[in-house]
Amino acid sequence: MPEHAALDEIVIARAVAAAVQRVPGVAGIGQGRHATATYGPNQVIRGVGVTRARGPLDIDIHLTAAYGAAVDLPELAERVREAARAALDDLSVEEVGGIDVTVEDLRVGGEQP
Amino acid sequence: MAETRQNVAETRPQETAPARATDLVTEHGRTTIADDVVAKIAAIAAREVPGVHELVSQGVGGTLSGLTQRVAGGGGDNIGTQGVSVEVGQREAAVDLRMIVDYGVSIPQVADAVRRNIRNRVNSMTGLTVREVNIDVTDLYFAQQQQQTDTRVQ
């Protein structure tokens, strides 16, 4: 188990981004107009903002949902939140504040970006 | 130009929305649904109704606007929000729609079906209650006329 104190924001953001993209109903992340991202040396994880304002980590996820007749967006956001939380648990990140989810776009046809 | 702008009181279904969590602020974080997403759901829902030929944006004439929309749309099977504007509140949304309908269909029936479909889709996908759907029918589409102009172009 890695120590959470040793984890960069960018590592956390990458794990969250990977987990979120695997959630059925998510067509992509970070494709909208909003520039939510986590920046590291020579790299950017778009669509996932990890910030440590004071103490706990705040996670901000911006995603594009796949259109489907059965998609309930608040429910999808909840599944995304659970997936993000599971990814954070895997990294032993304990101090998590809020996980905000914004559905910023909708894509028709297929779940692949 | 035909216009079906019906009274909200007439078109609003009497049943109240089923009890569900429309409050998107949970203890674990906030969920935000962009207005564009609501507009897109409405646009898709409108197009699902047979008889709706095209949605057109404000200002430009019907067929021309439809053409530019197809050209400018560009995103393959992705769909834009042209011809749709939404106002989204905490729990309710209002939708304004401009569309071209196929010649020969009953416009009030198509408009009713569009309202119903938008209301159902937006509610099931976002939890928002659609308070009103205002529909402007800006033009009619004649299939035959289109074929003629097509052959003339060729």
Image (tube, rainbow, N blue to C red):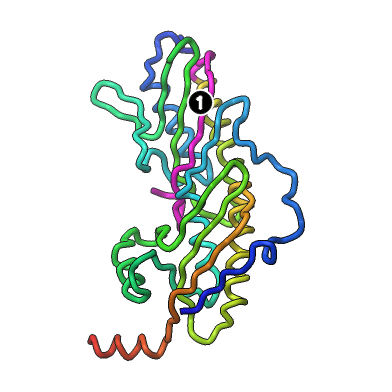
Left or right, A58 with reference to A30: right
Label 1 crowding class (10 Å Cα cut-off): few <14, some 14-19, many 20+? many
Quadrant of res B54: bottom left
**The stretch drawn in magenta includes residue A92:** yes
Q: Residue at x 43, y 14 (%)?
A: A53
Residue position marked by numbered label 1 in the rendering: A87
How many numbered circles does the render carry?
Answer: 1
- Residue B11 relative to residue B126: left or right: right
Position in image of residue A110 (x %, y %): 45, 55
Q: Is residue B11 magenta?
A: no
Please tell me which residue lies in front, B69 or A55.
B69
Q: Chain of mark 1?
A: A
Q: Residue at x 48, y 10 (%)?
A: A55
Residue A69: horizontal and vertical position, in percent? 58, 57
Asked whether, in this view, residue B106 is left or right of residue A111, the answer is right
Q: Quadrant of the C terminus of chain B?
A: bottom left
| Quarter of the view holding residue B71 | bottom left
Residue nearer the viewer, B91 or A82: B91
Q: Which residues are magenta?
A: A91-113
SS state under label 1: helix
User: Residue, x 35% and y 41% (percent of image)?
Assistant: A33
- List the single residue furthest toward the right: B15
- Kindly identify the residue that appears in the image at 38 percent across and 48 percent down: A113
Question: In the figure, residue A42 lies in which quadrant?
Answer: top left
Give amino acid for label 1: Ala
Give the x, y percent position of residue B125. Answer: 59, 50
What x and y, as percent, mark residue A19?
48, 33
